[in-house]
Amino acid sequence: MALTKKEFSVRDLVIDDEYGTIDSNATIQAAAKKMKELGVPDLVVVEGEAQKVLGVIADFDIVQNVVAEGSDANTEKVISTMYKITPVTLDTLVTEAFTRMRNLNVNVVPVIENEKLIGVCTIHDCWSFIPDQNVDEIGLIPVRNTRVAEFWFASVCAILAFTLGILLPLAGIFGYFTGNQLDLMSLLGIGPVGGKVTFHLFEARGVGIIVPFLDLFAKNGAIWLVIDIFSILMLIFGIIGLFSIVYASFSDTRSLQTGWIIRTVIPGLAVFFMAFEWILFGIAFAITTPQPDIAIDVIGLVMSIFSMVLLLLAINRDYIFREKETPKVAASEVSG
């Protein structure tokens, strides 16, 4: 990693001039054969006698866009499968070339000079020449590598939140509200048995009884169907939110860009459904006639709040850690 604040350009890189080209009108089969002959995973796509650079085709593009789609490699053209990326010049800043490849999630960008192709550079070539001047100064806890710390922190928070806020209520370990069976006979539609009843994600459970919310919907109105639907949505967005947090934080460690929907919206919806589930239960018991004697499951409430806080911390992981200050090395010492 560079130790000065100098902005490097592509000409400072070692440009790979051992590359292959393929005409944009060539077939995918021809491109695959040429990749095999040259032993390379990418080919620069050019057009016509002028050899105008249009983009790059990679072996991954062939697998994903041709093989996986069941297209005919003998007739499918390279131009329909390649990825379009604006070439860089020798004077293009390394940071710009890196950003261009990162935004497309690709590894190679063509390098041109006087409109002629002179080679390619990879995202790995650029990495070591990006100035180390964007120090992460936002956060509370100083660490040496903020992105790795954020990945592990976000992953652990998301897994704990999903387990405590969704899996355990689903398994019946704790719930949302509790009451005595004798006080809930009218609501549950059961005889006098006695004992405690706890309302979980999809059913009410007590000693020797399990009453699904769909049964309560038939007896007590649409609010219980709404609770069932929101429970399903909470479970779905809890799973998706868990994976989106892990994926986004892992992508940060690889300097890959992820959208705000994956980073914020999806896990944020998981938090919303967790909170709204409590509101729906409160509405259901408030409109029940006669109104039952019901109490909040304290453990369930604490676990839900804790889970929502964990998800919010995972979403806002950028504000948890900051880069630890390290002694600066003089440029003269580096060159020496």
Image (cartoon, helix red, strand yellow):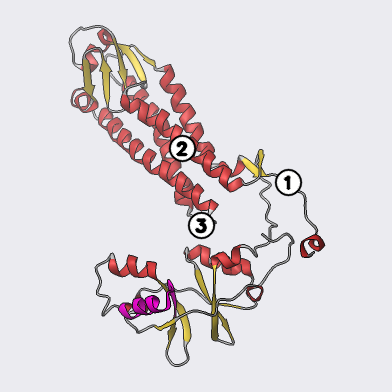
Ranked by sequence position, the earlier of labels 3 and 1 is 3
Which amino acid lies under the numbered mark 3 shown in the image of this protein? Answer: Gln
CB under 8 Å between callouts 3 and 1? no
Quadrant of the image occupied by residue 143? top right
> Which residues lie in the magenta part?
29-44
Neighbor class of circle 2 (other Cα within 10 Å; few <14, some 14-19, many 20+) is many
Front one among 41 and 115: 41
Q: Position of residue 130 (x, y in %)?
A: 65, 63
Instruction: Check if residue 297 falls in the magenta segment.
Output: no
Instruction: Check if residue 34 falls in the magenta segment.
Output: yes
Q: Which residue is mark 3?
A: 257
> Distance from label 3 to label 1 (Cα)?
26 Å
Front one among 272 and 25: 25
Front one among 93 and 181: 93
Element under label 2? helix
Q: Position of residue 144 (x, y in %)?
A: 65, 45
Which amino acid lies under the numbered mark 1 shown in the image of this protein? Answer: Glu
Query: Where, quadrant-wise, is the N terminus in this rendering?
Result: bottom right
- Name the residue rendered at 46%, 45% in the picture: 246
Q: Which residue is mark 2?
A: 158
Ranked by sequence position, the earlier of labels 2 and 1 is 2
- Name the residue rendered at 36%, 36% in the picture: 234
Provide the major secondary structure of the magenta segment.
helix
CB under 8 Å between callouts 3 and 2? no
Neighbor class of circle 1 (other Cα within 10 Å; few <14, some 14-19, many 20+) is few
Q: Which residue is mark 1?
A: 325
> Distance from label 2 to label 1 (Cα)?
29 Å
> Distance from label 3 to label 2 (Cα)?
20 Å
Neighbor class of circle 3 (other Cα within 10 Å; few <14, some 14-19, many 20+) is some
Query: Where, quadrant-wise, is the C terminus in this rendering?
Result: bottom right
Which amino acid lies under the numbered mark 2 shown in the image of this protein? Answer: Ala
